[in-house]
Image (cartoon, helix red, strand yellow):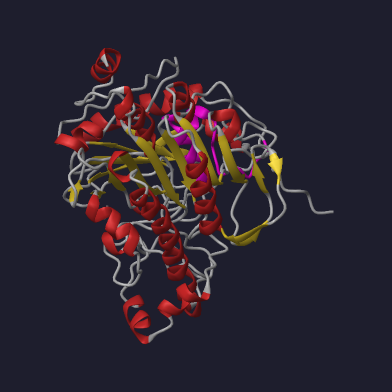
């Protein structure tokens, strides 16, 4: 008990954790879910009763961010508590070199060392050469059931604890939750557990069972869909097909249904009262496919954009007796914050020597305490859309910048000059063309204050340049050869 009390002080936690009281942890991650794609976050269309109930029993995080507007980097931030570019996850894992190296310390490894049973199920996508590069088992998960990328129904490509499986029957949300329920039934009940479930929904192929599709094949859906917002004029939705709305909305409802199976299990088995449940998304909504009906609400941008709609996502956390039910927090919470926050809740210690970018935010969520960040929140994606590639937030202010030089700055994917490789672009490009916004007064990023508040711009610019340089220096160098086979 004394050690837990000492750890809680060192980690800045306003509560003590005894061995017998350590909370279980369930971390749920959606894929490409927009900020306004749940009923509890303003959707008038999507039926998400189980997640809405979770929000009513816990706290809505209205300034919840993923660590990147892109899949693999965002997941890397959750696992390591570090900027994805420090770790070397510069893009989604379309390059075979990209992976989380074994010398990184993950939240699963820390909790495993603290006596937790750890389990992973779902879309991994943290290595370009899965499962040959470090996989969930190499990063602290006692039991894992993972697929390299995205899938819909009866998916091939699953591995369980390193063994390749035949195609697994069922929808992705269904089989991921089935795996979790099996793990929970068989676990050592004398130990706490941490399970991470990373869903494929509502990422392409965006499929759902008929019972969920049928919820949206009606005039009311058609009427309400006309009111949806998609991130503003910088978001291009040229491929969206009006007859595919039901697929997108139904896909979310199907995920919600299976999450409900899990939360019902926790309650039925007496686990609900001492389990932290987190739900969030890896980035904002997709806008380049026929099912592009995800919405960031009033926010500017979408997946792949460095404006708010690219990475401000739904966030829900429930911890009975600690976090007030039915509450809302505007405290900024980034994907890199989950590692320090969850290990603090567990009374665990991070003895690694690597720099963390995340901060323990639980004191703010539990008691409203002020949070002091050693590192500002920063997002960086070398090929981001929307005419900016780097952003940083301090307090209510957000500064954005371009990587320079570029072939041409447009709202499409950023491109390095023709004589510069991707890796050179990441390592050598400087940042400039700064924009400045006050997110409290202008959450939709419509009024650039760069010329209006030059002193604030100068202050933010200085911090951004230093942090950008620091992260760039630490990140590894790869050749970045695609894992895709060349066409003959």
Q: Is residue 92 above or below residue 241?
A: above
Region rendered in magenta = 71-96
x, y (%) of residue 106? Answer: 48, 28
x, y (%) of residue 448? Answer: 25, 49
x, y (%) of residue 259? Answer: 42, 56
State yes or no: residue 77 in magenta.
yes
State yes or no: residue 20 in magenta.
no
Q: Residue at x 55, y 29 (%)?
A: 139
Q: Is residue 446 visible?
A: no
The N terminus, quarter of image: top left
x, y (%) of residue 157? Answer: 68, 50
The C terminus, quarter of image: bottom right
Q: Nearer the viewer, residue 375 or 55?
A: 55
In the displayed structure image, the side of residue 437 where residue 377 appears, left or right: right
Q: Is residue 51 visible?
A: yes
> Disc count in the image?
0
Q: Indicate the quadrant where residue 320 lies.
A: top left
Q: Is residue 225 above or below residue 135?
A: below
Q: Nearer the viewer, residue 299 or 246?
A: 246
Q: Residue at x 29, y 59 (%)?
A: 52
């Amino acid at each position: 008990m004394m050690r837990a009390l000492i750890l809680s002080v060192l980690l800045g936690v306003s509560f003590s954790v005894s061995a017998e009281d350590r909370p279980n942890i369930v971390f749920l991650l959606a894929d490409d879910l927009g900020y306004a794609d749940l009923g509890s976050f303003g959707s008038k269309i999507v039926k998400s009763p189980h997640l809405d109930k979770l929000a009513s029993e816990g706290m809505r995080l209205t300034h919840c961010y993923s660590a990147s507007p892109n899949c693999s980097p965002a997941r890397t931030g959750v696992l390591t508590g570090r900027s994805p570019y420090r770790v070397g996850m510069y893009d989604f894992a379309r390059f075979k070199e990209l992976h989380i190296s074994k010398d990184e310390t993950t939240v699963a490894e820390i909790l495993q060392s603290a006596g937790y049973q750890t389990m992973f199920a779902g879309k991994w996508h943290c290595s370009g050469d899965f499962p040959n590069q470090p996989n969930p088992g190499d990063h602290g998960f006692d039991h894992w059931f993972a697929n390299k990328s995205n899938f819909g129904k009866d998916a091939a490509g699953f591995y369980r604890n390193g063994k390749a499986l035949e195609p697994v029957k069922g929808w992705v949300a269904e089989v991921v939750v089935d795996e979790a329920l099996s793990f929970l039934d068989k676990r050592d009940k004398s130990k706490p557990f941490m399970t991470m479930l990373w869903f494929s929904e509502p990422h392409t192929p965006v499929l759902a069972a008929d019972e969920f599709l049928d919820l949206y094949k009606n005039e009311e859906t058609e009427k309400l869909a006309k009111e949806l917002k998609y991130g503003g004029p910088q978001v291009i939705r040229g491929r969206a097909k009006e007859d595919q709305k039901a697929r997108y909305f139904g896909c979310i409802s199907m995920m919600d249904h299976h999450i409900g199976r899990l939360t019902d299990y926790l309650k039925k088995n007496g686990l609900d009262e001492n389990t932290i449940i987190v739900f969030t998304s890896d980035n904002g909504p997709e806008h380049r496919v026929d099912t592009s009906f995800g919405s960031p609400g009033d926010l500017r941008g979408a997946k792949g954009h460095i404006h708010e709609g690219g990475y401000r996502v739904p966030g829900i956390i429930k911890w009975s007796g600690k976090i007030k039910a039915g509450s809302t927090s505007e405290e900024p919470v980034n994907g890199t914050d989950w590692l320090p926050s969850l290990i603090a809740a567990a009374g665990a210690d991070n003895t690694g020597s690597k720099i963390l970018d995340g901060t323990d935010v639980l004191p703010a969520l539990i008691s409203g305490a002020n949070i002091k960040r050693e590192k500002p929140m920063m997002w960086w994606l070398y090929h981001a859309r929307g005419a900016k590639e780097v952003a940083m937030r301090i307090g209510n202010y957000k500064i954005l910048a371009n990587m320079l030089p570029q072939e041409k700055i447009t709202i499409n994917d950023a491109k390095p000059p023709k004589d510069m490789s991707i890796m050179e672009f990441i390592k050598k490009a400087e940042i400039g063309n700064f924009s400045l916004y006050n997110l409290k007064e202008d959450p939709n990023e419509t009024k650039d204050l760069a010329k209006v508040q030059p002193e604030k711009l100068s202050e933010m610019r200085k911090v951004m340049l230093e942090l950008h340089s620091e992260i760039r220096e630490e990140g590894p160098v790869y050749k970045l050869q695609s894992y895709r086979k060349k066409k003959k």
